[in-house]
Image (cartoon, rainbow, N blue to C red):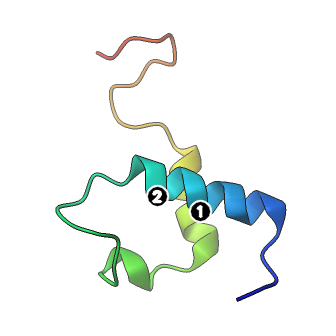
Amino acid sequence: MRGFSLSNLKYMRSFAAAWEGPGPIGQSDFGQLPWGHIIELLKTPPPGWCGCGTRG
């Protein structure tokens, strides 16, 4: 496989590192999203995250 930009590779690595699913990353409802939507979701902080190093 080829043609991925450096920024896309970084986003893919970030996604894989943040994966907390019940099993390995595979095709699911989330897998139906276009890659651009997944990137936007990765940019969105989780609920309750204040950005100051603590949660809550």
Nearer to the camera, 35 or 47: 35
The kind of residue on which mark 2 rests is Ala
Q: Which quadrant of the rendered structure holds the N terminus?
A: bottom right
* Residue that lies at the very extreme toward the bottom in this rendered image: 1
Helix, strand or loop at label 1? It is helix
Percent x, y of residue 37: 56, 68
Residue ID for mark 1: 12
Tell me, for residue 41, which label it has, or none.
none
Give residue 13's quadrant in the image: bottom right
Q: Using the image, determine if residue 24 lies above or below residue 16.
A: below
Percent x, y of residue 34: 56, 80
Percent x, y of residue 12: 59, 62
Q: Around disc 1, counting alpha carbons within 10 Å, would you say few (fewer than 14), some (14 to 19), or many (20 or more)? A: some
The kind of residue on which mark 1 rests is Met
Say whether residue 48 is left or right of residue 35.
left
Give residue 30's quadrant in the image: bottom left
> What residue is shown at x 38% (from left), y 11% (from top)?
54
> What residue is shown at x 17% (from left), y 62% (from top)?
22
Q: Around disc 2, counting alpha carbons within 10 Å, would you say few (fewer than 14), some (14 to 19), or many (20 or more)? A: few
Residue ID for mark 2: 16
The answer to whether the residue labelled 1 contacts the one labelled 2, judged by CB atoms less than 8 Å apart, is yes
The Cα atoms of the two marked residues, 1 and 2, are separated by: 6 Å
> What residue is shown at x 50% (from left), y 56% (from top)?
15
* Residue that lies at the very extreme toward the front in this rendered image: 1
Helix, strand or loop at label 2? It is helix
Q: Which quadrant of the rendered structure holds the C terminus?
A: top left
* Residue that lies at the very extreme toward the left in this rendered image: 22
